[in-house]
Amino acid sequence: MRNRHRFRSGIHRPPGLVGVLTLADLAAGDTAVVTRLHGHGPALGRLRQFGILPGTEIKIVRHAPLRDPVEVEVRGTLVSLRVQEALHVVVDDGRRD
Amino acid sequence: MAVGTDAGALTIAVAGNPNAGKTTVFNALTGAHQKTANWPGVTVERKQGTARLGRSTAHVVDLPGTYGLSPSGLDEVIARDYILGGDVDVVVDVVDSTALERSLVLAVELRELGRPVVVALNMYDEVEHSGASIDAGKLGRLLGATCVPTAASRLRGIGRLKTAAFEASRETHPPLKVNYGPDVEPEIERLVPLLRGLGAFAEGMQRWAAVRLLERDVAVETRVASTAGGRRVLDARDESLHRIRSLAGEDAAAIIAERRFGVAAGAAKEALTRAPADRARLTDRIDRVVLSKALGYPLFAAIMWLLFQATFVVGNVGGGAINSTVGWLGTTVSHLLGPGLLHDMLVDGVITGVGGVIVFLPNILILFLGVSLLEDTGYMARAAFLMDRVMHAVGVHGKSFIPLILGFGCNVPAIMATRTLEAPRDRIITSLIIPFMLCSARLPVYVLVTGVFFSASAGNVIFALYVLGVLVAFGVGRLLSVFVFHGRSAPFVMELPPYRLPTLRGTLLHMWDRAWVYLRKMGTLILAFSIVVWFFSSFPRSPENTDPIAAQEQTYLGQFGHAIGPVMEPLGFGWRETVSLGTGFVAKEIVVSTMAVLYSKGDFEALPEGIAASGLSPLTAFAFLVFVLLYTPCIVTVVAIRREAGGWRWALLAVVNQLAIAWVAAFVVVQGGRALGLGP
């Protein structure tokens, strides 16, 4: 049987994120809780400014027509981020495989 | 004792998140008493004004919009440095009260700095409308800052905000102490005495500095490292970070951010006496259409098309009226003065030159009105969302699309807007490709020349030129990002603000701000240059009965045009076109002014006939327009590129690069067109 989570293809996954569920793998309408932010760098600082932190609930609103970037709702605010950045937000969507 | 004298005046800094209505609050506080300058050393705009309350006066300074005070971008650094600089008596934090939790994080960070803070709970009318309510008194006690509900776009609550700000300046509040939890607090305690010993921070600010060091705040690190003994403090900090990491299994920066959000969320929850109805519903319903796969791009293209049609069709009506007025003014002045040098200078130089530019003011006002509407409604962020995939392929940030759109108005503010981009590479690439965007200063040339040669399809020709500019910009951007820069682009994490109905007052102010820049540029630079062009195109003077064209060829400008004629000949341009292009280096509008001087000798109404008889064919006229689109940006733009990209070499690259591209493109148009038999 196939894994219930379909990992988004066509993006470069850093070795630490292979087989790990991230914001980039979710579909529009999905809700998940952030478990950690992977790596470091300026992008993570921006994510934190919008309150994308461990324990925060986050909802995928939609993808742009060209599938990238992705729009999420976090703490009542709509935020857009690239799929490559969403990949660094490790999430738990409550489903067990 | 006399109060309210200038020396005793307060300084109020206005801070806030982008899209929270910060500028509206600033405008409401200061009314018409404001002026615009730049922050020292950078080109981020700094607005300053005066607020009066009774006999007291306050300087009000508009800080750049920020989500926090961590120096992740230049805006945050400017805001924080200014507040820490010591001149600020009170900070007014403009909060979007419909997104209370997120907005209060900045308030928490400001309170940690220990300055008196007054929170403007802005857009409070929307909160009421959604059926919610906020206990401002309770929120104030939780934050240690007076909270005032406002609706700045309706001028509601402004008086009370002003009173609260003046009162807060007389109070002292110790810095807000956020509890950063069992893993971080001991490390703060460890660093505070070390920092106190260092003496680099004011008394009472050591805790703040310790927290910032644990967040790896580069600005604070630099400050510490440059103080004697600072290296030891940084080593101690590294050990602290290591301990936190092994104890908590998380980065200190993440824990600190979590705790700060916790305080903000707690305060928001306590203060919200009734929960709001889902405010995102209308926005979501609009976005479902505006950002949909099927309609997203068609709507975007339609909005852009509408913007241009309004600019040209509606704008040209007003332009006609101004045109007649300028013609009338020229004739009247002519009659009043009688022949002479002063007459020639005023009529042929000043009135023709400036008149040829002011004619296009209606077009420019409408274009800026449209851009203001796009920004104020919230659509501009959607445009960035739709375009990021494309912009990313070009090698820049989706946010670059916004400066690029602004480039249609004027390249100079557009290049200044690249400050919103964090990575220098994005800023440099965007600055270098903005000049290919057809700015409004080039419109006068386009409207004039297409009117003469393509009257029936002028709109289509101009639209094609807009598209060509965008394509060249994209191509050059891609080349620069691949061959000159190899780094990755900056993060694309951006708020999509809720749609809002812009107020007439706000939009008009916004439009006026922009138009004023255009007018000021015209009033000073172009006036001066019109006189210079008139001089070079009138001297040395020929005897009275010389043929007018021959007389013009004898002038300094005519001589210059002939000298570089061989270079321009393959493009089908004569000396007058060449001279006009040359003067366009100072400002693109001047191409028209020069044409007016060279083709119709002061009779502005006769200019189209003069151009029709110039020897240009529709094909070479089109090549001329292509050349105007792509060649060397005006000198103000070149200076702006130097400042934003950070060096003359980039500015020089822009000049040389664009001259070469323009020449090649015009050559291809003319020679290709001739080969295909499209015209002489």
Image (cartoon, coloured by chain):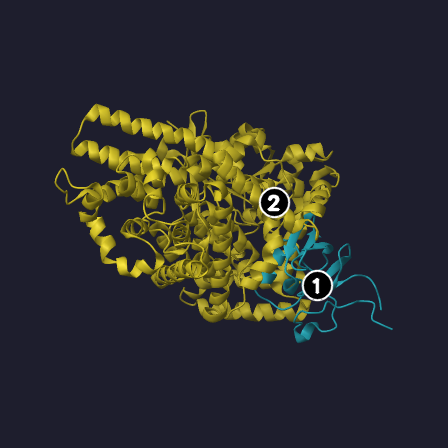
B559 over B169 or under it: above or below: below
At 53% from the left and 50% from the top, the residue drawn is B402
The residue most toward the front is: B677
- The residue to which callout 1 is attached is A24
Tell me where residue B533 appears, x and y as whole percent. Answer: 25, 44
**What residue is drawn where x is 84% and y is 72%?**
A2
- Can residue B166 be seen by looking at this rendering? no
Q: Nearer the viewer, residue B11 or A84?
A: A84
Tell me the residue at 71%/69% (across/down).
A9
Is residue B239 among the parts visible in the rendering? yes
Residue B665 in the image: state x and y as whole percent: 42, 60
Looking at the rendered structure, the kind of residue marked 1 is: Ala
Q: Which residue is mark 2?
A: B302
Q: Is residue A49 above or below residue B591?
A: below
Element type at mark 1: helix
Q: Amino acid at mark 2?
A: Ala
**What chain is colored yellow?**
B
Q: Are marks 2 and 1 on the same chain?
A: no
Q: Residues within 10 Å of mark 1 (few under 14, many from 20)?
A: many
